Amino acid sequence: MIDLFLKLNGQKHSATTDALIKDFKLDVTKKARTYSKGNRQKVALVAAFSTEADLYIFDEPTSGLDPLMEEVFQQHVLALKASGKSVLLSSHILSEVEHMCDRIGIIRDGVIIETGSLDDMRQLSRTQVTVSTNQPLDGIAKLPAVHGFTQSGAKASFAVDSEELGSVMSALTPLGIKSLQSTPPTLEDLFMRYYNQEGADADEQH
């Protein structure tokens, strides 16, 4: 089947193909009809990675793969990138997208609602901050860029609009920072924010 896929694209089974079969631990001695979903996925991936092309398109490529094989897939995609190839990846596994992709597009109801680099998108979202200070933090909760403020003693946790992080830090510094931890938004955070925002906009229109 792998050889057939390659032939359809005018290419042949190569040493690269054999190496990929080994990397993905694909047992080619078994009948294809006995393959699990994961093994069928491996067949397609081996054929794809064996093909010499300028653009590779992967649609939910790791569906059915175990975590070890997901890692193998990511390594081969990164190798394609390093060799100057272009990769278009569609995936619901956001950590996978976050790890491999340079630019991201978020699709909702079949429409692209946002595109950009992960850093660009993070600038439009919120950073989670946990901080403890020598002086009371009451004034921080009133800042427009601060959201979801909760406090326990001298420690507080809240989200900050990423583009306003500098101004919030300036407000925290005079309070005598004892400890501070900031966590940038993950792709999952961004994804849910855009989805929720779109849903809210639709409700307002109704």
Image (cartoon, helix red, strand yellow):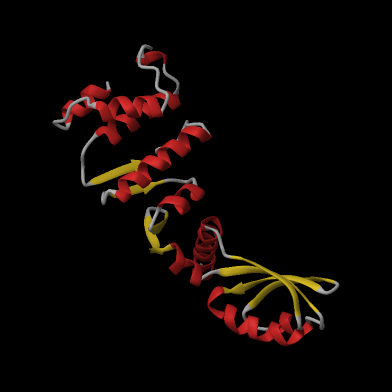
Q: Position of residue 138 (x, y in %)?
A: 79, 82
Seen in the picture, residue 133 relative to 25 is either above or below; the reply is below
Residue nearest the viewer, comparing 27 with 37: 27
Q: Which residue is at the far bottom? A: 174
So how many labels did they put on this image?
0
Is residue 191 toward the left or the right of residue 32 in the image? right
Is residue 142 toward the left or the right of residue 110 in the image? right
- Please report the residue visible at 40 percent of the width from the left and 17 percent of the height from the top: 27
Q: Quadrant of the N terminus?
A: top left
Residue nearest the viewer, comparing 31 with 191: 31
- Please report the residue visible at 21 percent of the width from the left and 47 percent of the height from the top: 54
Q: Position of residue 129 (x, y in %)?
A: 67, 69
Seen in the picture, residue 177 relative to 127 is either above or below; the reply is below
Is residue 194 toward the left or the right of residue 19 in the image? right
- Please report the residue visible at 58 percent of the width from the left and 81 percent of the height from the top: 166
Q: Which residue is at the far right? A: 153
Q: Which residue is at the far left? A: 10
Seen in the picture, residue 129 relative to 78 is either above or below; the reply is below
Q: Position of residue 202 (x, y in %)?
A: 49, 65
Q: Position of residue 111 (x, y in %)?
A: 37, 57
Choose top left, top right, bottom left or bottom right for residue 52: top left
- Please report the residue visible at 52 percent of the width from the left and 35 percent of the height from the top: 67
Choose top left, top right, bottom left or bottom right for residue 34: top left
